[in-house]
Amino acid sequence: MRKFIFSTQPSNDLGLIAQSIPIARELRNRGYQIIFCTSGKAPCQAISNANFKNYRPNWPLYLILTGDTRLMNLLRMPISMHLKRDLGILLWYLKHMNEYSTTEIWNIDHFMYIMGMCNVKYTQATVENLSKIIVKHKPDAVVNFWNPFMSIATKINNTPLISVIQADLHPQSKGFIWWKEPPDKLPTPIPAINKVMAEYHLAAIHSVGELSLGNLTLVLGIPETDPLPDASNIHYIGTLLLQNQNEKLPDWMENLRKDQPVIWLYPGNMQYIKGHNSPFVYHRLSFDSYL
């Protein structure tokens, strides 16, 4: 039986879980073994409710920084094998989040800079711990949603990677705020990432978007609404919706006018960090304005 590890961006929200569980269910129905590797209290509960096993890195700081601040994780922090390193990362992370202030997140490079990937020690430790999950469970492939740390881990272990992304993560896209020109010299985590890549003798990258591409890259949406300059190596898969498998649309939906807009509610965080809107908010608000 083939085995797949499903991995999502480490954060405590349900946006990527709403995309990943429908695919995981379909593969399980076809006889594949599916396990998850994701963190955050809310995602873990959703994965459990869907009857999937979830194997998270055994690193307390990772669990804390991704939203699982339960007492047992906090108590494990002082007895960490890498206490000095982890305390340094934690203090840096808190300072980084407090000092970085912007209401516009332009692209995936900018986003991952804010989320801490610009710190070599944090990136190195996260990749190392995710790599241990791959080594232990030996998947036939990793199905990855927005997690560049996991992308690096798959490269280290020569594990096939299936990426599921939105078009605005693609390195050839115009980013999250695609209707405006970005400012010059946006902060980027690339120098830190390439230091980690070099340690494992991996080729350097020029954008985090390159880590969003896999051996197979699936793009949510359709080319008419989410066009990319070169779509030769990607496959559009339309929309995904997590819901009860027996759920049906209400009858009144059939009676709506064809020109009547329908509001789609994003199930993730409106803000990952105080003062920072979710990248999806820009995209959806601009779409609503268009309607």
Image (tube, rainbow, N blue to C red):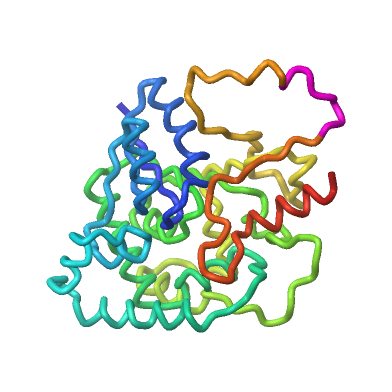
Q: Could you tell me residue 227's position as x and y percent?
A: 76, 47
User: Most extreme residue toward the left, as rendered?
Assistant: 79
Q: Could you tell me residue 59's position as x and y percent?
A: 24, 63
> Going 37% across and 58% down the picture, which residue do you hit?
153
Vertical placement of residue 235 versus 210, above or below: above
The foreground one among 220 and 12 is 12
Q: Quadrant of residue 80?
A: bottom left
Which residues are drawn in magenta? 253-260
> Going 58% across and 57% down the picture, which residue do you hit?
270
Q: Is residue 199 magenta?
A: no
Our reading of the magenta stretch's main secondary structure is: loop
Vertical placement of residue 186 versus 134, above or below: below
Q: Could you tell me residue 174's position as x and y percent?
A: 73, 61
User: Most extreme residue toward the front, as rendered?
Assistant: 252
> On the rendered image, what quadrant is the N terminus found in?
top left
> On the rendered image, what quadrant is the C terminus found in?
top right
Q: Quadrant of residue 171?
A: bottom right
> Going 25% across and 59% down the picture, which residue do you hit?
70
Q: In the rendered view, does 225 fall on the left or right side of 7?
A: right
Q: Could you tell me residue 84's position as x and y percent?
A: 21, 82
The foreground one among 85 and 271 is 271
> Going 48% across and 67% down the picture, which residue do you hit?
203
